[in-house]
Image (cartoon, rainbow, N blue to C red):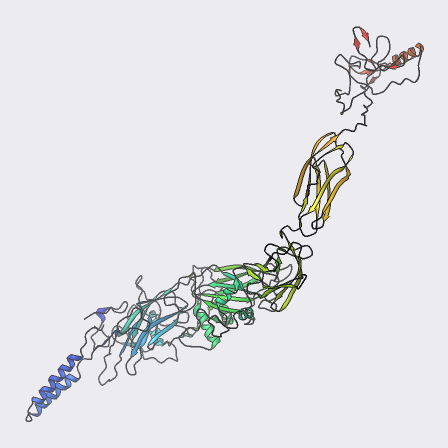
């Protein structure tokens, strides 16, 4: 015989025999049907050998033997059938309960689980796959919880009994134990259950969960403070009879199979996925009105959005921005609201990955005081303007779509039934889901958060049992902030944020002239550019070139990839300078019409060059114009161009700037006759530059031979003649100046008005003597009256031995700077 592990925390020593109400762990693995049949045969043989003359006593004995064989111990049959879908299976056990005198009803149940442990996330739906079967009118029940915790010996704090059928049970863990539970809980007033709870002395203490919670509060049978928290909860298929231990643990008397449900802490991904996609009508047109499977279903999928979108955060006005958020622990509530919207009910989750649901389901979750928030808000409103916000509650379903998908970043339990990620596709057209129309240049932030405040925790409102699933205490208490149900007292707010912007719908060509003419190179004939429109946009172009015979027409689809656009103009190989017309269509609608010009180099179609005729070295006389300095400017492209020509002599000594306009293939000569070479004789570097082209040369400035420099009045030779004057401007030689101690020439020129005789000389001498001054010991000049005078800048003339000053006339000649040689004044 093989033995079976008892239920969690069950005490084998407390088990009674099979005919007691306490129950016993049933051994399994032995078939007893053959033994009973053999025994019946032996009794029948004895009856046939009895003589007709046997006494009534012998007949009574024989009947007693036959009756004992018929009413022998019932068989315990082992069923090892697998659950559909496979996986690990627990042994199915068929049991019977003891009956009182005259009680012909036996409570038998068998069952099995597909897993020894089911891992799920608190707040999400989990699927329990099992086999559960009861004989006759009996019912199979699924015990959830009621077990002791191995770490501290206390109970899990929750117990529930569910009516189940053969197959599987999906438990919405957010609703479990509340008035919105989606399973047939025996705690619900409209669910009829035949339960019996006894204490360890065998006394019946309750016949339903309500009585159990009233009599033994430690069992966790009622009065939930909040949704069941992450913990290990025992699962057992039983017949509805239980023993309540003194610790509060609830053990089934008869067990067909056991397993565990382990609920994990919910997790949150703090990044938001952002991409842009086309309008739903564009996608439908691009798919021929059919889904990807070709079955004619026009419903969009998330794959459709990706196939027709690009990974960028700038959404083109009129397209859709797609925001993706990932979290666990919210799907039980979301499933409930989705079921309410669709009118579905039952134990199956109404939402699945890969589907779309009404976006108002998310609105219901956000308004349910669940501590879940989502806000999309403009970050750059104008002065004194309110920011534009996403208004989900009033949004038209055509403008916002809610897509559900498998989680990508977070670990999920193996029993989790719900998606892990949701996406919002939001239209940016006028009249869309925002409080005001969005415009190019608008910037937005999108924030998804699970609210929480340290020191506070989500709680149900006080009220009836079971509690209202979405009756948060914070809903009616202004002093309480909204809390996420699965945050602990030490948990705070967690959020994920992303940004996006709106931009105009445009197509910008790479090469155009100032008048908008498109340029295409002769070697490839491709028109290129950039665009904000998405690749699936139906754009085409028609290029027409007039020839001598018939027009040459080319129609091509625009290729768009990673924001770059290109189209074949059909002008490859055409001669530079060839002209054509270009028209752009979106579908059948004309968007624009332009001229096209074939060029050799579309990047530089109008380059101006300084031709070979440009002079690089020129000689000019000082003061004359630079008329002989010329620049030949040539247009090497196919487009007329106007650029600035610059002459720079000696790094800014002379600068001349002017604009030059040159037609395609032509050249212009520029001279500088109006510019004078106002420079000292010498050599000066110069440069001519236009449109990035530059030539360098040397300008030689020569002195004008017709010009003689005249010295200034004090006899200095001037800068050009190389003056050897000292700091006072004196031209005295090395042998000594005829000036006075100050070395000054008074700057005055002695003027000989006429030829004079000796008397004139005497008068001059006397006059000079009279004007002479004497010097005192203090170095100051004193006049004849003895008055002091400040020193003059002009010193008195030096007296010669024969009474003639240095600036006096002698024989009609002016003596200037006479030199004393060998005892003679010269």
Question: On the picture, is 804 further left or further right than 373?
Answer: right
Looking at the rendered structure, the number of numbered marks drawn on it comes to 0
Question: Residue drawn at (78%, 33%), measured in percent from left and top?
Answer: 623
- The x, y position of residue 694, in whole percent, is 66, 41
Quadrant, the C terminus: top right
Quadrant of the rendered structure where residue 36 is?
A: bottom left
Above-or-below relation of 476 to 707: below
Position in image of residue 21 (x %, y %):
24, 77
Which corner quadrant holds the N terminus? bottom left
Q: Residue furthest front?
A: 549
Note whether residue 729 is visible: yes
Q: Left of 735 or right of it: where is 269? A: left
Q: Tell me if residue 479 can be seen.
A: no
Residue 312 drawn at (x, y percent): 53, 59
- Residue drawn where x is 11% and y is 84% of the image: 42
Q: Residue at x 22, y 85 (%)?
A: 102
Residue 203 rendering spot, x and y as whole percentages: 26, 76
């Amino acid at each position: 015989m093989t033995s079976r592990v008892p239920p969690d925390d069950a005490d084998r020593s407390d088990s009674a025999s099979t005919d007691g109400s306490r129950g016993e762990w049933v051994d399994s693995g032995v078939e007893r049907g053959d033994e009973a049949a053999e025994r019946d045969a032996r009794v029948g043989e004895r009856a046939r050998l009895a003589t007709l003359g046997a006494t009534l006593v012998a007949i009574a004995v024989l009947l007693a033997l036959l009756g004992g064989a018929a009413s022998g111990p019932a068989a315990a049959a082992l069923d090892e059938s697998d659950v559909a879908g496979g996986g690990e299976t627990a042994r199915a056990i068929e049991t019977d309960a003891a009956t009182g005198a005259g009680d012909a009803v036996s409570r038998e149940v068998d069952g099995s689980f597909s897993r020894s442990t089911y891992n799920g996330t608190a707040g999400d739906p989990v699927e329990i796959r099992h086999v559960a079967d009861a004989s006759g009118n009996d019912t199979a029940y699924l015990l959830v919880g009621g077990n002791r915790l191995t770490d501290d010996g206390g109970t899990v704090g929750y117990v529930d009994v569910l009516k189940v059928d053969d197959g599987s049970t999906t438990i919405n863990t957010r609703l479990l134990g509340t008035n919105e539970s989606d399973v047939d809980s025996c705690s619900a007033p409209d669910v009829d259950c035949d339960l019996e709870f006894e204490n360890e002395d065998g006394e019946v203490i309750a016949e339903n969960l309500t009585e159990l919670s009233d009599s033994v509060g430690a069992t966790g049978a009622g009065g939930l403070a909040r949704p069941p928290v992450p913990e290990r909860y025992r699962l057992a298929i039983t017949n509805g009879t239980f023993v309540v231990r003194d610790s509060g643990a609830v053990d089934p008397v008869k067990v067909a199979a056991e397993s565990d449900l382990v609920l994990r802490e919910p997790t949150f991904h703090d990044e938001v996925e952002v991409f842009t996609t086309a309008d739903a009508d564009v996608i439908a047109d691009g798919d021929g009105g059919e889904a990807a499977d070709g079955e004619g279903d026009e419903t969009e999928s998330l794959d459709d959005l990706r196939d027709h979108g690009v990974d960028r955060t700038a959404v083109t006005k009129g397209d859709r921005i797609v925001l993706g958020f990932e979290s666990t622990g919210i799907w039980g509530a979301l499933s409930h609201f989705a079921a309410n919207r669709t009118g579905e009910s039952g134990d199956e989750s109404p939402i699945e990955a890969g589907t779309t649901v009404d976006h108002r389901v998310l609105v219901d979750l956000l308004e349910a005081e669940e501590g879940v928030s989502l806000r999309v808000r403009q970050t750059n409103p104008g002065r004194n303007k309110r920011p534009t916000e996403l208004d989900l509650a009033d949004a038209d379903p055509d403008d916002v779509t809610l897509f559900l998908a498998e989680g990508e970043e977070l670990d999920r339990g193996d029993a989790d039934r719900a998606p892990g990620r949701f996406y919002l596709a939001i239209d940016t057209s006028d009249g869309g889901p925002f409080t005001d129309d969005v415009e190019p240049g608008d910037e937005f932030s999108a924030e998804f958060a699970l609210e929480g405040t340290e020191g506070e925790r989500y709680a149900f409102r006080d009220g009836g049992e079971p509690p209202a699933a979405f009756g948060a205490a914070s809903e009616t208490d202004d002093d309480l902030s909204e809390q996420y149900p699965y945050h602990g007292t030490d948990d705070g707010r967690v959020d994920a944020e992303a940004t996006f912007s709106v931009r105009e719908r445009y197509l910008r060509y790479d090469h155009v002239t100032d008048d908008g003419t498109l340029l295409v190179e002769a070697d490839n004939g491709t028109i290129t550019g950039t665009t904000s429109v998405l690749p699936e946009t139906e754009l085409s172009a028609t290029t027409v070139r007039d020839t001598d015979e018939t027009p040459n027409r080319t129609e091509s689809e625009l290729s768009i990839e990673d924001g770059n656009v290109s189209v074949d103009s059909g002008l490859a190989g055409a001669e530079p300078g060839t002209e054509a017309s270009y028209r752009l269509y979106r579908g059948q609608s004309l968007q624009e019409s332009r001229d096209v010009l074939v060029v050799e180099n579309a990047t530089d179609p109008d380059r101006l060059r300084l031709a070979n005729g440009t002079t690089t070295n020129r000689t000019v006389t000082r003061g004359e114009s630079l008329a002989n300095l010329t620049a030949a400017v040539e247009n090497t492209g196919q487009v007329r161009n106007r650029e600035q020509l610059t002459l720079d002599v000696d790094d800014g000594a002379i600068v001349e700037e002017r604009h030059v306009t040159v037609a395609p293939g032509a050249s212009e000569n520029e001279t500088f006759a109006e510019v004078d070479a106002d420079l000292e004789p010498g050599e000066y570097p110069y440069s001519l530059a236009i449109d990035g082209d530059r030539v360098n040369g040397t300008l030689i400035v020569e002195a004008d031979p017709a010009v003689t420099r005249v010295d200034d009045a004090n006899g200095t030779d001037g800068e050009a003649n190389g003056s050897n004057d000292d700091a006072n401007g004196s031209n005295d030689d090395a042998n000594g100046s005829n000036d006075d101690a100050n070395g000054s020439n008074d700057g005055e020129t002695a003027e000989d008005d006429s030829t004079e005789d000796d008397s004139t000389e005497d008068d001059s001498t006397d006059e000079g003597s009279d004007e002479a001054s004497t010097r005192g010991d203090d170095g100051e000049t004193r006049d004849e009256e003895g008055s002091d005078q400040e020193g003059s800048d002009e010193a008195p003339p030096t007296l010669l031995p024969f009474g003639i000053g240095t600036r006096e006339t002698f024989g009609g000649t002016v003596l200037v700077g006479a030199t004393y040689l060998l005892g003679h004044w010269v």
